[in-house]
Image (cartoon, helix red, strand yellow):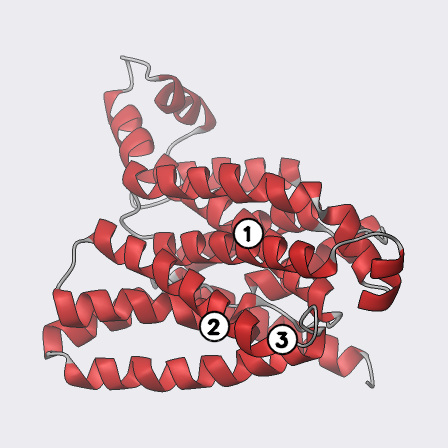
Amino acid sequence: MAITAVGAGLVLLGIGTISFSPAQIVAGLTGDANEPMATRIIQRLRLPRVLTALCVGGALGAAGAVFQSLSRNPLGSPDVIGFTTGAATGAIAAIILFQSSPSQIALAAVGSGLVTAFVVLALARHGRAGGGYRLILVGIGTGSVLTGINTMLMVKGGLDQAMQAQIWLAGSLNGRSWSHVLPAVAGLALFLPVLILNARRLALMEMGADMALQLGIRVGRTRLLVVLAAVGLTSVATASTGPIAFVALAGPQIARRLTRSPDVPIGSGAIMGAVLLLAADLLSQITPLRLSLPIGLSTGFLGGLYLLAVLLRRDR
């Protein structure tokens, strides 16, 4: 999958309004003075877009693996639990109420996502630790409330602001620059190691809170730590591209099927999430009608087909 991700990234660097050969792609990446156009387009436009897709897909894939493990439900994902909606609320409020800059919108999305996580965890807390199904149910309810708030904010704003918010909500890799890449890379470097270090504890917690406590795992502390790290990844990803659907849902599931490993697929789920987002971006650019679709619409289309296939395949 890592090789597939690199291959898809290289293909994306070469296609577009102006196509480049493999030799021109290498020249553009290395800054060859003999290929000034390739260097300028690849390094300023296409490489930041590809790297943003890699980081955002990886962040969503790892976060989805955590929530599916905690809830012991293959349909658990940041989209379902409401954390993505919470991050979107902060961004929409920044656009509608304060006419914020892109960097301020990103910070608002991260902050709102973390606040949403604290609220959901507090409401889902039961005894010493919050139950998995309780977490999902509280998250669904919170997400529904936030969706209503988002709609009210859209109605309140002016036409231009509402259109800007709607474009952001569609999720897009268009116009990504190095200012979008750096926060995404920083988020991965900060939160992903936390999840990897706690992957074994997560796997043991899947046997139930009581069993994990008997094995010496501090369930409440571990759950809080990994949820905050996963929410951090989700918020950073949402801030970079807007809400992206189904990558966090499908990535860990496909990774688990490929690896056939009983462990929580955090690393493999991250790689698969990156592959899925790059594939969706590639699909959006090679559609027969030559439509430049927002990446959120492409992932929604592919994810909907995947979800239908999973539901039709298993009668349960």
Badge 3 crowding class, 10 Å Cα cut-off, few under 14, some 14 to 19, many 20 or more, is: many
Residue at 73%, 75% in the rendered image: 310
Instruction: Locate residue 185: give its quadrant.
Output: top left
- The x and y percentages for residue 241 are 37, 56
Of badges 3 and 2, the one in the foreground is 2
- The x and y percentages for residue 79 are 52, 71
- Please, what is the three-letter code of the amino acid marked with disc 1? Ala
- Please, what is the three-letter code of the amino acid marked with disc 3? Leu
Q: To which residue does mark 3 refer? A: 135
Q: Secondary structure at mark 3?
A: helix
Instruction: Give the CA distance from mark 1 to mark 2.
Output: 15 Å
Q: To which residue does mark 1 refer? A: 229
Q: To which residue does mark 2 refer? A: 119
Of badges 1 and 2, the one in the foreground is 2
- The x and y percentages for residue 197 are 69, 41
Q: Residue furthest top?
A: 33
Q: Secondary structure at mark 1?
A: helix
Instruction: Locate residue 12: give its quadrant.
Output: top left
Badge 1 crowding class, 10 Å Cα cut-off, few under 14, some 14 to 19, many 20 or more, is: many
Query: 247 above or below 144?
Result: above
